[in-house]
Amino acid sequence: MEDGLRWLAQSGLSSDDGSRVLPVFGPGDGNLANYLWDGSRVRVVDFEDSGRSDRAFELAEITEHVGSWVEHPLDVPAFLACFDLTAAEEARLRECRRLLALVWLFLLAFDQENVRNPPGTAERQADRLWQLLA
């Protein structure tokens, strides 16, 4: 967490950080259970956290959501290769992934009362964050 907080303090992320990328309407919740694939189309079923966003943030939401790796890992490189991102989106994706990995570390570290994930998930999340910070 300390490494993540140090990164955050110097990250330069701010509310206007996405000004170099095109805005999109996004679901804001990367839980893979919210995306239904019928073999040809993806349908989004949860809009509780939806609103103005950008592609990089939404892709980070999906790749860093605990549901994308804890039991059935998403092949992140293959998934991200499906998108033709601009240089600005690539840079923002990297920073958003770090941010969301840090958020998930906090959520998992303090998930003592309502444990929903296998033992060791918080430790595995810390390793994920370190890899993203490297």
Image (tube, helix red, strand yellow):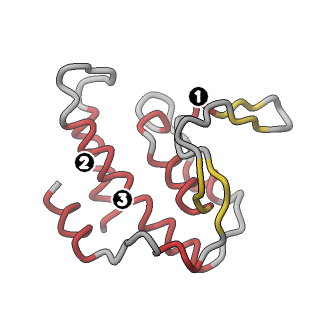
Of the image marks 3 and 1, the number of the one nearer the N terminus: 1
> Relative to 17, is 40 on the left or the right?
right
Across and down, in percent, residue 122 comes to: 24, 37
> Relative to 31, is 42 on the left or the right?
right
**Label drawn at residue 126:** 2
Question: What residue type is disc 1 on?
Answer: Ala
Across and down, in percent, residue 53 comes to: 58, 59
* Distance in Å between CA atoms under marks 2 and 3: 12 Å
* Distance in Å between CA atoms under marks 1 and 2: 23 Å
Badges 3 and 1: C-beta atoms under 8 Å apart?
Answer: no
Q: Is residue 113 above or below residue 130?
A: above
Say which residue appears at 41% left-offset and 32% top-offset. Answer: 70
**Label drawn at residue 99:** 3
**What residue would you read off at disc 1?**
33
Q: How many marks?
A: 3
Quarter holding residue 117: top left
Question: What residue type is disc 3 on?
Answer: Leu
